[in-house]
Amino acid sequence: MIRRLLAPTTVSLLALAAASAGAAQAPAAVPAAVASEAVPARYQELVALYGEFRAFVPPPMRDGVPDYSPAAMSVQYSGLQRFMERLRAIDDSQWPVSRRVDYMLVLAEMRGMEFQHRVVQPWKRDPAFYSTTNLGFGPKMHGAFSIPQLPATAEQVRALKAQLEAVPEALRQARANLTDPRGDLARLAVQQKRIEVNVFGRLAEDVRAHHPELIAPALAARAAAANFLVWLEDIEAGLPAHGGVGRENYDWYLRHVLLLPYTADEVETIGEREYQRMIAFLRIEEHRNRGLPELPMVRTRAEFDAKRAREDNELLGFLRNGWVTIPHYVQHDPEEGPYILPAERDPSRPGLFDDPENVHFFFQTEFRDGLPLRAHNLPGHAFDQLQASRDTRPIRGQRRLFFVDGLRNEGWAFYLEEMILQAGLLDERPRTREIDYILGAKRAARLLPELRMHANEWTWAQANRSLINRTPRWMDEDDAIAQFDIELYLRQPGYGIGYYIGKVELERLLAERSMQLGTDFDLHRFHDAFRAAGAIPISLIRWEMTGRDDEIAELRGNF
């Protein structure tokens, strides 16, 4: 019955889902129906082109320093146009939907790079882009490095020495390249560089015992970062305040890179309605729970680790009981520890469980009951990463570039937060249900700040204030999560809206698919088919899963 109702590609996705349900320990593989398809004559040309393109994306390296000079970026942009012309010459109109989806992925990533060159231009507008150290996620220059655990191996020491020695030249070039810096972005870079100065200073102290040959390059890197910081502090007050991409560019980016069939105005309408829904449900839940004691917070690392282990195991056991196929390799990781923000990597700050206590918004929730956030992070992001590392498909199995997978990944993770509430896992945890709604309200409150910043109507400070004021609990004026979030959403368009709009898109697909299948719909199979499609925009999963292409022509544009 199901096979008669589904498009051929949908059958292939459910074939994988059924196979994984029976053998949950098997790594992700190409669905059998796709593997048996006749490969279109020019599909291998697409695969080869994609491989060339991905190798082309990083900037040229000269003496360990990425070249973001105007000349180098002009050459790269011209090369990108040639790649796009080669893609345009490949006719996919008669290909099976699964292969056409791959074509759209390549197109979206090329357009993502085009948007970087035409609009974002972080190498000339965003001083925070020149983060020589990799202290956390967010846009940064190619080659940003992490400090290895000390003592390091001989190979790590050689690599770290070369990386440290490249820092002064990288920051010298950064000052030359930053011909159009923006005030908000410069102020964020000031905070970043203060941390980096401390990181290099602490490194120079920490290597004395085992790797004294690193002292001089660490101190030189610290001096270069400090000089860059002074330069930023001197210029930031006179820079144009706003750092957004502009509303028209933002709408183009949503449709043609993220492949999202909404405008910014439509996203705002959806986001405000979802914010109201979360606040209303929270107040209902609070009234229902009036008189109940608040949940206590853990106060030590040992308490935290024990609580997280219990929560992870309870969560995975619940989801494995008929909700979604979760392979054996997705399990509690005792080494994961608390999530550390980039600002918390500043060696001048006290540790998480040290006095004075400074617990940001997410720890306010997780230190009470972590089930909602663990749903987001373990069967959400961790599962995605582990499954992606086992995906052998030549295009879909690659890590997406330019945030093309952002809404799908954040949407799935956030969907799981509310799904466990609706599915009954929190029935006996009334205060945890409140936490779930608080998290939902906070994620909905992110949309307006991102939209207003990229419309160049709000500064970072105004957006930060909006998020703090509209989050119903546990977010103070200087909350580290609010500061980090708003920085990230200014520097990476689509990130702040991705959680809620990705979830909305997933729920829309669930509703549409369930009505299409009627009594043959099965939620477990739907979840597995959704995941089997890979980390790709949900509009493309919808095309495969339902066979409906009514959104594709507009998202594809003139290709």
Image (spheres, grey):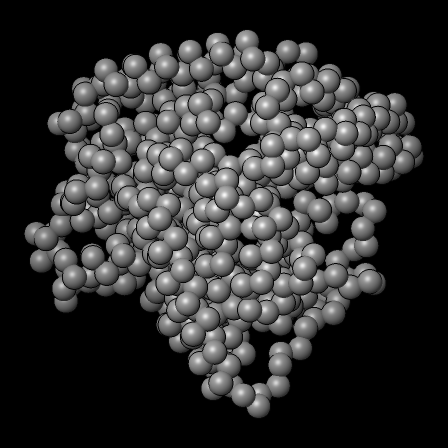
- The residue drawn where x is 82% and y is 38% is 198
Quadrant location, the C terminus:
top left
- The residue drawn where x is 25% and y is 32% is 556
In depth, the one of 264 and 523 nearer the eye is 264
Q: Position of residue 327 (x, y in %)?
A: 42, 54
Q: Position of residue 228 (x, y in %)?
A: 76, 26
- The residue drawn where x is 87% and y is 32% is 204
Q: Position of residue 352 (x, y in %)?
A: 75, 58
In depth, the one of 178 and 505 nearer the eye is 178
How many numbered marks are there?
0
Q: To which quarter of the image does residue 269 belong?
A: bottom left
Quick check: 470 left or right of 391? right
Task: Answer whether residue 170 is visible to the viewer in this image.
Answer: no
Q: To which quarter of the image does residue 248 belong?
A: top left
User: Residue furthest toward the bottom?
Assistant: 291
Quick check: 457 left or right of 81? right
Quadrant location, the N terminus:
bottom left
Q: Position of residue 323 (x, y in %)?
A: 35, 65
Task: Answer whether residue 226 is visible to the viewer in this image.
Answer: yes
Work out whether 128 lies above or below 216.
Answer: below
In depth, the one of 507 and 157 nearer the eye is 507
Quick check: 518 left or right of 361? left
- The residue drawn where x is 44% and y is 32% is 401
User: Residue furthest toward the right?
Assistant: 209
